[in-house]
């Protein structure tokens, strides 16, 4: 029963139980949905998926060896980050193939490590999928610090990050060190993923990085509006997902992850129809001058 929870002599109302999970999820989604727009436009979705699973594997190793899982989580993610430049230079095998293999290996190791850890079995689900309803003020505080740092980096370095992301050749002609700013982007992404995995799990972290940004980019071609739509979709999914999971006694992070998909399912057909209509109008506008001549 979720009606009331007794803490000493105080009765905590259900609404009070939901505040901290919603706050934690909102902080995580704000940063991930913002950075996720870059992830989708850079076409590095598999990179974020692989890093999320590597972080989960690191947490599992920490639990198995009974050492601080924060250290092993970030060690695995940063180790994976070292392979990203090597993957981009490799021509014989596609980047998606290598990242897919990395994802599969990391997911398998995460399950093995957690299954063999001396900790309780429910930590396996918490590590891989997260459990927002157990979020605390400390979790929200750590997430808040990482989110502020991540967004500050992106706002201060907005122009060089934007140019190095989408037009590196032009950025180089302007004197922008694209490799340096790529490294800054990936390091910030790795730190963000590592902290979000600890709070909401690998599954929800990956969902934040992909589903709301894809929804936003289907609706608009303007980058600043896409950021706003992406973050808004994440915030709405958080509130809906946490309330649904609490009311129906469902795992919270997977429920929120499912809710991040709903705007995409609802909007995708409309967005595709609008884009097809624009394409037809553009084709007609090209053909009309030819008919007149």
Image (tube, rainbow, N blue to C red):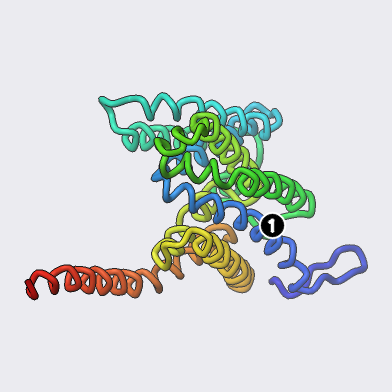
Specify whether 276 is left or right of 139: left
Q: Which residue is mark 1?
A: 24
Quarter holding the C terminus?
bottom left
Quarter holding the N terminus?
bottom right
Residue 26 x/y as whole percent? 65, 60
Given the current orientation, which residue lies at the most extreme right position? Answer: 9
Number of callouts in the render?
1
Q: Residue at x 24, y 68 (%)?
A: 279
Q: Nearer the viewer, residue 162 or 22?
A: 162
Residue 4 x/y as whole percent? 77, 73
Q: Residue at x 54, y 50 (%)?
A: 35
Q: Nearer the viewer, residue 43 or 57?
A: 43
Q: Residue at x 52, y 30 (%)?
A: 177
State whether residue 122 appears in this view.
no
Q: Is residue 49 above or below residue 29?
A: above
* Secondary element at tag 1: helix
State whether residue 210 appears in this view.
yes
Q: Is residue 284 above or below residue 88?
A: below
Q: Residue at x 69, y 61 (%)?
A: 21
Residue 60 x/y as whole percent? 58, 35
Residue 174 x/y as whole percent? 49, 36
Specify whether 82 is left or right of 133: left
Q: Residues within 10 Å of mark 1 (few under 14, many from 20)?
A: many
Q: Nearer the viewer, residue 249 or 15?
A: 15
Q: Quadrant of residue 13?
A: bottom right
Q: Is residue 39 above or below residue 266?
A: above
Specify whether 186 is left or right of 191: left
Q: Quadrant of residue 76?
A: top right
Q: Nearer the viewer, residue 293 or 104?
A: 293
């Amino acid at each position: 029963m979720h009606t009331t929870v007794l803490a000493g002599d105080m009765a905590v109302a259900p609404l009070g139980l939901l505040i901290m999970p919603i706050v934690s999820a909102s902080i995580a989604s704000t940063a991930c949905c913002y950075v996720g727009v870059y992830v989708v436009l850079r076409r590095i979705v598999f990179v974020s998926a692989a890093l999320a699973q590597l972080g989960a594997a690191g947490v599992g190793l920490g639990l198995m060896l009974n050492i601080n899982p924060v250290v092993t989580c970030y060690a695995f993610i940063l180790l994976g980050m070292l392979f990203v430049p090597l993957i981009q230079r490799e021509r014989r095998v596609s980047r998606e193939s290598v990242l897919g293999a990395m994802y599969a290996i990391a997911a398998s190791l995460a399950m093995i490590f957690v299954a063999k850890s001396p900790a309780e079995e429910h930590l396996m689900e918490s590590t891989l999928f997260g459990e927002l309803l157990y979020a605390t003020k400390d979790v929200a505080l750590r997430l808040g610090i990482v989110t502020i740092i991540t967004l500050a980096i992106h706002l201060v370095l907005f122009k060089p990050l934007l140019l190095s992301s989408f037009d590196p050749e032009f950025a180089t002609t302007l004197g922008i060190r694209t490799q340096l700013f790529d490294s800054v982007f990936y390091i910030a992404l790795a730190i963000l993923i590592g902290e979000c995995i600890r709070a909401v799990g690998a599954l929800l972290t990956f969902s934040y990085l992909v589903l709301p940004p894809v929804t936003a980019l289907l609706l608009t071609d303007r980058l600043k509006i896409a950021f706003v739509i992406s973050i808004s979709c994440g915030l709405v999914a958080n509130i809906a997902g946490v309330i649904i999971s609490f009311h129906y006694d469902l795992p919270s992070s997977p429920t929120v992850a499912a809710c991040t998909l709903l705007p995409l399912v609802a909007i995708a057909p409309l967005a595709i129809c609008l884009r097809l209509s624009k394409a037809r109008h553009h084709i007609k506008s090209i053909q009309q001058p030819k008919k007149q001549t």
